[in-house]
Amino acid sequence: MSETEEFVHPYIPNSAPAARVAMLAELGIERADQLYDAIPDELKLNRPLAVLGPILSERALRQHVAALLERNQSCADHLSFLGGGCWQHDVPAVCDEINSRAEFLSAYGGDTYADLGKYQAIFEYQSMVGELVGMEMVSAPVYDWAAAATSALLMAARLTGRRRLLLPRTVSPQRLAHLRNVGQPTVEITLVAPDPESGLLDLDDLRAKLSDDVAAVYVENPSYLGFLEARAGEIADLAHLAGALSVVGVDASSLGVLAPPAGYGADIVCGETQPFGVRMQYGGGLCGFIASRDEPAYVEECPYLVVSVAPTRVPGEWGFGWSSMYRTSYDKREASPDYAGTTQWLWGITAAVYLSLLGPQGLRELGEGIMRRSRYAMRRLGRIPGVTAPAFRAPHFKEFVVNFDGTGKTVATINAALRERGIFGGHDLSAEFPAFGQSALYCVTEIHTKADIDRLATSLEEEVA
Amino acid sequence: MNRPRRYHAARWDEPIVMELSRPGERGYFPPPVEEELAAEVGDVLADIPRDLRRAVPPALPELAQPTVLRHYLRLSQMTLGAHLTPDASLGTCSMKYSPLVNEQLARMPQMSELHPLQDDATAQGIIEIVYRFERILCEISGLYAFTFQPGGGSQGIFANACIMRAYHAARGERDRRTEIITTAFSHPADAAAPAVAGFRVITLMPGPRGYPELDALKAAVSERTAGLMLANPEDTGIFNPDIAEFTRVVHAAGGLCAYDQANANGIVGITRAREAGFDLCQFNLHKTFSTPHGSVGPACGAAGCTAELARFLPAPVAAFDGRRYYWDDDRPDSIGKVRSFLGNIQVVLRAYAWALAHGPEGLKAAAETSVLNNNYLAKKLADVPGVEIAYKGHGRRVEQVRYSWRPLLEETGVGTEDVRRRMVDFGLQGYFTSHHPMLVPEPFTLEPTETYSKDDLDEYAAVFHEIAREAHADPDQVRAAPHRAPIHRIEEGAIDEPARWAMTWRALRRKQRDAVPAAD
């Protein structure tokens, strides 16, 4: 086997010469390259790949990669106020322990007999999310909120046989871009104006745009810009009157204090559970879900894997399975209106652990603590000359827009100055929403202390003075 | 081990977490607010509009911390991950060793505590890692640029379908180029994703050699052809030697060619997308590049393309200006987003470390060893009574084989699902049968990656011999399996019946109540 003959690698047991020779002999060949007889010679590379390595020493490998990573500045050693769809929350130790378990980490598509625990944990995830949103059907983890919202809105289009989707103009650009791309062949997107004072959906504009081709009205609680869509129930009623569905997106960490969307008329709920014990990982911690009533018409349009309990031959014993796979692209192939695949199950398992730890009381305290801190931060920043916080007059959860127009400075300048002080300022909205001027989206969670917020405020006071 | 293992799974008889709840127990306190802050802000909950205020607490379980830990540790013990067992079972999934050092690196705060909207100046290390790994994939594929935004293989295939759409639109041919051609033994996403992107999909069926004949492709190609999306080898493990001719025919008609390399495990360093004429490809980093499958993700379907198509890639892409690394978001022709932010970058980090640990010799050794293992196991299984190899006799297989228990079913009445359940009794993961359509009767698909030793493979063969023996001697023993798993055989029908399925605890409780006849 030419150049790799004496190459023994610690991850490859049969790179040891003895096993190799014995196995080749069993196959009646002498060299491993003879295994590739089926590949035409003109398609063979026939030269070593021009890549670095091998680094066979684990210590050397760790040093190389760690040295690169150490050039990053993380939210662990900086004071961060970044949110906008991925949020820094406290992570209970049990969450890290469970998602590090070799069994969960290295399992994949096995069935309920080999992988019972994986299925049960995901069933528990679905069950607890179901309690939060007030729905009986909850999908297994979806890629992220954006994918969940897109699939939920495409579901609504199929359920109603209509094409038009109404979304707030203030929706997350990430989620909107995702919907525009996936929905390009199948739906029309119309954005509804916000009320300039409160940011809330302008109901007159909504009424004007609701027609008999509207499949769904989508709102979020909390919204991308942090305010609560106070009239979500009224919006759902208007949608229903027009024969459309109400689809509501949630940051699930709000649901210890906010009502389940099913209670104010949502037909389909989607959202994000990354706040539940999953580290941000540069956005790799996201984990979405879709929920609806347990009605065959809705379930059949859900494109993702969904775990169901299944009785075994022993009374009282539960197994699990992927329910109604005939819904999904795995069975339907090109007849499928959406696609399923490998998503973010490890984070769903983690969220189940988190919600089991917090319980109803913990989730309420989490939500209340976030609201207290974010209100304090809004008041504190709002006292800085030239700074408006919040920019929208409405109740907020976790995030809020801060406007710096009165300071004469750009968000980019201010954030660069904050970085010098070890602070990651709020996400710059000036490119996403030019109409809001020099504004930034600030995020305050339970990890922030009063001193953290005061430090931010003091720094801003000095920088904009 | 060259005999079946005397195994028994952990069987904890563990209740659903809601059943463990004891009112008043607490598992974790969120950090409290300072009294001074609380006093200053007052009653924030009163601020919430009445309709949005939660009136009834969510019915989450109430549990002390040790109870939660114990519950989920028990569930983990009843999960047969690939770190615990030689998982050659999940064919098409490339279950290989996920090195623990990579796990340690990915859990460093300089990775795990990064926010995706941080300024690029604060993320120089991770952007450089993405940039470096992109260069590695470019060399492995011969293509020009990659995106890591897709969070799984299907999403990567979808990104490639969107790029095809954008390419034809840019040439003013979107309305005319309406069809994408795939093959029956390619992953279902190769049919579904282009359909979602708005294309009509034509599926080529396998010919006598297990892959579509060139004439079938020629008959399907027309001026409507937007592109070709297929795997090679497909699920059968058979390499289509005419592949360069396939791509030539599609190019001649004006279409693009996308190579589904979700599983490239047998061919890294051996043959590349570029030489076979592909314009696009995608690698599943959780397969060929070893990142842990995470019980179904997080994952990454890294999608790559030629220089001509690079302007269509999802934005942003990692870039380097000679001085600093940055995310280039100024991409006017980009298809937009297929996933929020940047994707599962922590997965890319692990894949980078894995590739570096291997280098050119190691990557080739991994590929060759996976093919050696596969052909060795196939030879061992050829002796098992009741097993046959689909499309046998058309050259050596690459990294996997689709087998069939058709003879066993005919001889004993024991079919592939029965054997799958029985395997678990010997400590092996139940195998993958087949994607749809199930063209091979009583199918199963094994993929013994380079991670497994000769002893591991001998153990597999011994287990299959034993189950085949049982099927002849005592078929009910196999059909009633599993016997030594965490649970007994389920009623398969229940998960597909609306009246009986239950996706949440609240649905289960309601259906249980509904099922109890009213006592009157």
Image: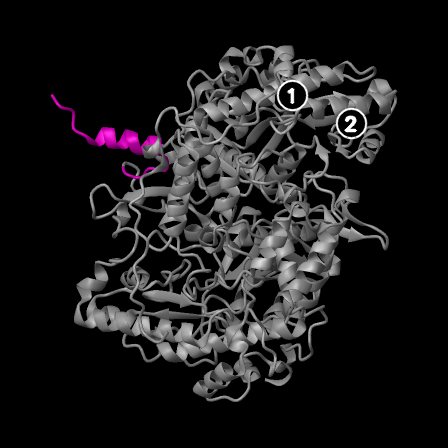
From this viewpoint, is residue B255 visible?
no
Foreground: disc 2 or disc 1: 1
Q: Quadrant of residue B266?
A: bottom right
Q: Residue at x 49, y 26 (%)?
A: A363
Q: Is residue A281 magenta?
A: no
Label 1: few (<14), some or many (≥20) within 10 Å?
many
Answer above or below: position of A267 versus B396.
Answer: above
Residue at the spot x=60%, y=83% of the render? A5
Give me the disc on residue A374: 1
Residue occupying the point 44% across, 53% down:
A103
Query: Residue flagged by tag 1: what amino acid is it?
Result: Ser
Q: Quadrant of the C terminus of chain A?
A: top right
Q: Is residue B513 magenta?
A: yes
> In the structure shown, which secondary structural element does the residue marked by tag 1 occupy?
helix
Residue B370: horizontal and vertical position, in percent? 51, 73
Which residues make up the magenta segment?
Answer: B500-520
For label 2, the SS is: helix
Does A298 appear above or below B241? above
Disc 2 designates what residue?
A434
Between B375 and B454, the one nearer to me in the picture: B454
Q: Amino acid at mark 2?
A: Pro
Q: How far is the residue under mark 2 from the one under mark 1? A: 24 Å
Q: Chain of mark 1?
A: A
Quadrant of res B4: bottom left
The chain letter under disc 2 is A
B423 on left or right of B362: left
